[in-house]
Amino acid sequence: MEKIQLMNVGRQHQTYREEYEEAVINVLRSGQYIGGKEVESFENEFALYHGAKYGVSCGNGTDALVLALRAFGIGKGDEVITVAFTFFATAESIAAVGATPVFVDVDEDDYCINVDLIEEKITDKTKAIVPVHFYGHSAHMDKINAIAKKHSLKVICDCAQSAGTTYKGSKQGILGDASCFSFFPTKNLGCDGDGGMVLTDDEKIAKAIRSYKVHGSGADGLATLQDEYKNKGEEFPKDMPIGMNKYYNYLIGYNSRLDALQAALLRKKLTHLDEFVEGRRNNARLYNEALKNTSYITPCEREYTEHSYYLYVLKHENSQEIMEKLKEKGVPCGTYYPVPLHMQGAFWNLGYKEGSLPVTEKLVKTTFAIPVFPELTDEERDYIIKALLECE
Ligand SMILES: Cc1ncc(COP(=O)(O)O)c(C=O)c1O
């Protein structure tokens, strides 16, 4: 048996090699590498898959969050509620637009934002909530949306880990005001490089993102700037030079594109996403079964979601010792993520201390992920289960 990897993206390529390579070669031969048919088609197909009206692709999942926050006008002086038990980019994007992340603890069982703790963190500066559908388990969107509605907040979901997750029976793409996806290679839907997408049902937000991602240029940039003036109750300057092409810039934006090669690959991979998720769920089911009467706490799956198992995470009081033993046996494992965001140097100025988020702090010491990618072989999975039982 070859060395087991925690995530093995090369195997998927082997399975669909002809299809994926043909897609890439077609783009190479087309001479259209930025924008064009592949990118547009993928945006439409991904939006359709998730039941969203608009899909705007971009360079990566971090940019997707930044672009969505900017499009909703979130910036300096604003506060955005999110979690600290996530990847750094969730809160980094909030800080990058000039706003302040406000961390709320997570639920001890499903590891998503604890909806009962949100309202106490809302102030007159709060503008949005950024829930993370962590590991592929959906946050409790009905409750989050109800709180957001009551306090007039935007909901921008971090869906980097949840492509293919369902919420109350439907694909969980657009349950808030915008959903931000990452196509990093290891993700449920991963490209062979970097990529991201924002889904929204709001045409104005889609236009703003379309402009911000290309240096604030073109007709979408102009429309967004005109809206800004209107919202401030100010008259649009009559003497401003106006042009619709890409050399007229109306907003300070970014250069953040999904390229045509990645889009062509993602179009192919999207047709298999349900299979990929089913493969992950099948592995999770078999792990759950095998670990039923052991001291491992298997992942919780609330009745409102079908977990897509980007990561399969076990909880155990002795997780650190167990991880050491598993690694000795050749079973890769790791904590996602070992340093919670409120304890990161980059956010130290926010004033959180050890003890500020007790559940998050406990989970980083007691949880660990094991391989769950869909191409894991029966032999590998059986070996992992045997090792887990020996390490308890
Ligand atoms: C929860 C979460 N948010 C955001 C991101 C950022 O995505 P990207 O790496 O594509 O910028 C990631 C990627 O790992 C993530 O896991």
Image: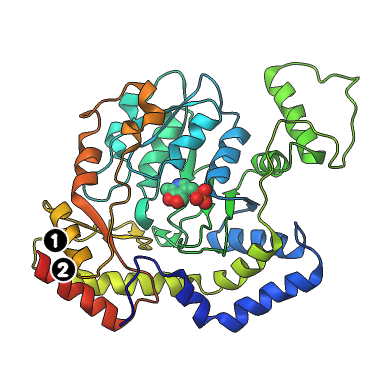
Q: Position of residue 6 (x, y in %)?
A: 34, 65
Q: Nearer the viewer, residue 163 or 4?
A: 4
Instruction: Tell me the number on the disc at residue 270.
Output: none
Q: Which residue is mark 2?
A: 388
**Is 126 left, or right, of 243 in this rendering?**
left
| Coloration of the structure image | rainbow
Q: Nearer the viewer, residue 352 or 144?
A: 352
**In which quadrant of the rendered view does residue 191 lie?**
bottom right
Q: Nearer the viewer, residue 344 or 59?
A: 344
**In which quadrant of the rendered view does residue 241 lie?**
top right
**Is 241 left, or right, of 356 in this rendering?**
right
- Ligand 1 within 8 Å, label 1 CB: no
Cα distance between the residues tagged 1 and 2:
9 Å
Q: Earlier in the sequence, mark 1 or mark 2?
A: 1
Mark 1 and mark 2 residues within 8 Å of each other at the beta carbon: yes
- At horizontal 39% and vertical 73% (from top left) the residue drawn is 374
Q: With respect to residue 278, does 256 lie above or below?
A: above
- At horizontal 22% and vertical 79% (from top left) the residue drawn is 382
Quick one: quadrant of the C terminus? bottom left
Q: Position of residue 7 (x, y in %)?
A: 39, 66
Q: Which residue is mark 1?
A: 296
Count of numbered tags: 2
Disc 1, SS: loop
- At horizontal 36% and vertical 25% (from top left) the residue drawn is 348
**In which quadrant of the rendered view does residue 223 lie?**
top right
Q: With respect to residue 163, does 8 lie above or below?
A: below
Could you tell me the amino acid type at mark 2? Answer: Leu
